[in-house]
Each structure stands twice: as C-alpha cells, then as structure tokens.
Image (cartoon, rainbow, N blue to C red):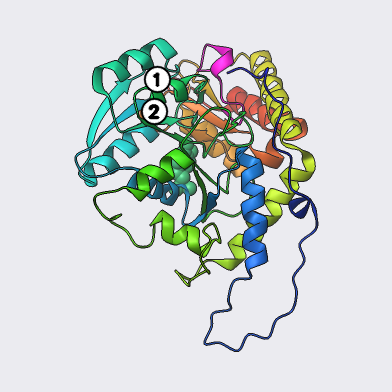
Amino acid sequence: MSFNNLLSTIPPATRILEPLKVPSKLLMGPGPSNMRESIMDDVKAGLQYLFQTNNELTFAVSGSGHAGMECAVMNLLEPGETVLVVQTGIWGQRVADLVDRLGGRVQTLNVEAGKAATLEMFSKAMEDCKPAVVFVCQGESSTGVAQPLEDFGDVCHKNGTLLLVDAVASIGCVPLQMDALDIDCVYAATQKVLGAPPGLAMISFSERAVQKMRTRKTRVPSFYLDAFELANYWGCSNEPRRYHHTAPISLVYALREALSEIANEGLEQCLLRHRQCADFLYSKLEEIGLKPYVKEKSVRLPGLTTIELPPNVEFKLIIDKLMSQGIEISGGLGPTVGKVWRIGTFGVNADKEKILKTVHALDEALKTVHNKDV
Ligand code: PMP
C-alpha cells in the first residue's frame, strides 16, 4: 500500500470542525423526537471529508457495516447481472453470498490468504467476465491485508463496470480518496477507526453509480435500504425531506462527534498515526520473536495486524490469559482461523503506550502458558 499520496485534496468543512450545537426544540409530534436536519448535514459534510469525495449521495445507513454492504449491493445490482468478487478473505465470501441471494451471478478472483490481488490479476479477471459490478475489500480484516486500489477504477470504467469498495476496516487508517480513485461506491462503519458505537454504516455513491441506479429495470428489493429514499431523508436530493424511517439519533450524534474529531486531527495525521503505530507494533512483535502473517509489508493493514502463531502454542489460552487482564485480542477469522492472532490498533488504540502494554502482556502470557504439547 502506497502512503506517498497522503495529501487530502478536499478540506474539512468548517461546520464539522466546530463543537456540536444542540438547540432546544419544542417537540409536539407523536414522537419519537424528530431528527434535526443540521446534524445530518454535519454528518454528510464529515463523511465527504472522510471519504474524500464531493458525491451528493453520501450518508449513513441505520445498521452496522453489513447494512452498508447490503445497501451497496442491492442498489448497484439487478437480478441476472454479474459481480466480480475479488476474494481476499471473508468479506468477499459474504458479498458473494449476498449477490447470490439477490439473484445475481458471482465470478470470483481467488487470492491467496495473506496476499493482495495485483492489477495484472485483476485486469485479466475483468477481461474474462465483464461484470456489472466489481467488489473489492480495501481492509480485509480476516487476513490483515490492505488491498491497493490504484488504477482499479480505470480498469472497471473501461469495461462499463462499477467499482464497489468495502472500507469498514480501512477508512482512516489507509488512504482512500474516493473521487481521485474513481470509486463508485464505498461503505464503512462507525466502530473501527472512528471509535464510535456500532450501528451506522456510512456510504457514498458516485454520479456514475447514481446514473445506473436511475435507469434500473427492477425496483430495489428493499425499502429500508433504497439509496434514493435514504438520500432524500438525508437531504441529498433537491426535494423536501420525507420521513423514511426512525433513525437512531444517539448514534448519529456520536458519529457527528467522531467525524469532528477526525476532521480536527486531520485525515493525514490520522493516517500517519495509524501507520507509525503499526510499524511500532511490528518492531515490538519482532523483539518478542513473533512474525506478521502478511509477508509483504506494503500490503499490511495498519489498523489490524495478523500474527503467525508460534509452533506448539495453544492460541486460545493466550487470548484468555490476556482477556483475564482486561486486554482483548482475537484469533483468526475465515481463512485465518487457527493460524493467527489479530491485534487491532484502530482509532484511539493507535497509541504506542497501549501497544506496548498489549505486547508486554502477550510476551508474559507466552512465557507462562503451557505449550499444548507439554
Ligand atoms: N467489512 C469488514 C472489512 C469488516 O471488518 C466488518 C466487521 N468486522 C464488516 C464488513 C461488517 O461490519 P459489521 O460487523 O459492523 O456489520
């Protein structure tokens, strides 16, 4: 992953740099309390900065990261169309399952776990299947790989294909300039780098994606996740806002504050902090004899590090030992089950003291725990 291009071209709007203002309002309706439009506008501005996009259709979906995924796929895809899934881990599998449920066809570019797809592999797969949509996970949290996206947009658009990117585990820790990378749809979630409570998925659609959505032959199979309905609710269309659903207002406030924090820190600084903390973690792990699972350093995901299990160590015992001290680390997921530990350094946990504490606890646990063969 190249960090040469950390420069953000889209500055944060003043409104998201400012503290939250909560005006008092007389709420006379049947309730629950109506959502104030200014908060939604703040969130939209914060998301445009976070995603580095000027896309009008930029908002939050009520639901966790999966809701973002479902919203993206449901709106971009029509039954019978093909999705090329760049499968680097569990999230490609999840999207493939979703596409199948929606009556789409799935073509898969299988990438060895712990590696990223190359542009050559991707271009070749594109020639072979000419899909309507391509799915790529930028931060593959099951393997700890950060998928480079440079030129993927070009390859897609030459073929009339839309590029969909999962940035749940990468937004804020890996550069993602949505407009500059020509991405058509990005979704992310609140609970990783933003450190906000789970329950909202942030999403943005390009003009190209909007065109395709406008000319759909079939209706979006979900009202709740219909992007144009949501866009109206979020004030992204020129029409007056209509009630769509009851959004979880407390989560919207929390997201607003998390976006304000990142805007005040500055996206570049946030990216750099995650990068530096990941490098610090690698060096500390090496000192205690542990090796990263992802061999190619340039494609390691800064917010989530996968670590090879040393021989003869019962990984679960180590996890339990750390948990008993109030430190959570995790085992593998999908293709890495039983092969790795995963350490997250997202958001405020991209912090050298917290990393030192975790690695120290890991070292102590490894020294004391019984080997499974003993
Ligand atoms: N994509 C990625 C890359 C993720 O890491 C996750 C959650 N770990 C998701 C999607 C799904 O998000 P959620 O659990 O919030 O539904």
Q: Residues within 10 Å of mark 2 (few under 14, many from 20)?
A: many
User: Foreground residue, 284 or 168?
Assistant: 168
- Local secondary structure at mark 1: loop
**Residue 193 in sight in this render:** no
Main SS, magenta region, reads: loop
Q: Is residue 83 visible?
A: yes
Q: Are marks 1 and 2 in contact (CB under 8 Å)?
A: yes
Q: Amino acid at mark 2?
A: Gly
Q: Earlier in the sequence, mark 1 or mark 2?
A: 2
* Relative height, residue 337 to residue 42 (above, below): above
Q: Is residue 301 magenta?
A: yes
Residue 338, quarter of picture = top left
Q: CA distance from mark 1 to mark 2?
A: 6 Å
**Residue bounds of the magenta highlight:** 291-304
Left or right relative to 304: residue 83: left
Which residue, given by chain and number where applicable, does mark 2 sit on? Answer: 89
Query: Which numbered circle lies on residue 113?
Result: 1
Image check: 264 left or right of 229? right
Closer-to-camera residue (232/341): 232
Rendered view: 57 above or below 62:
above
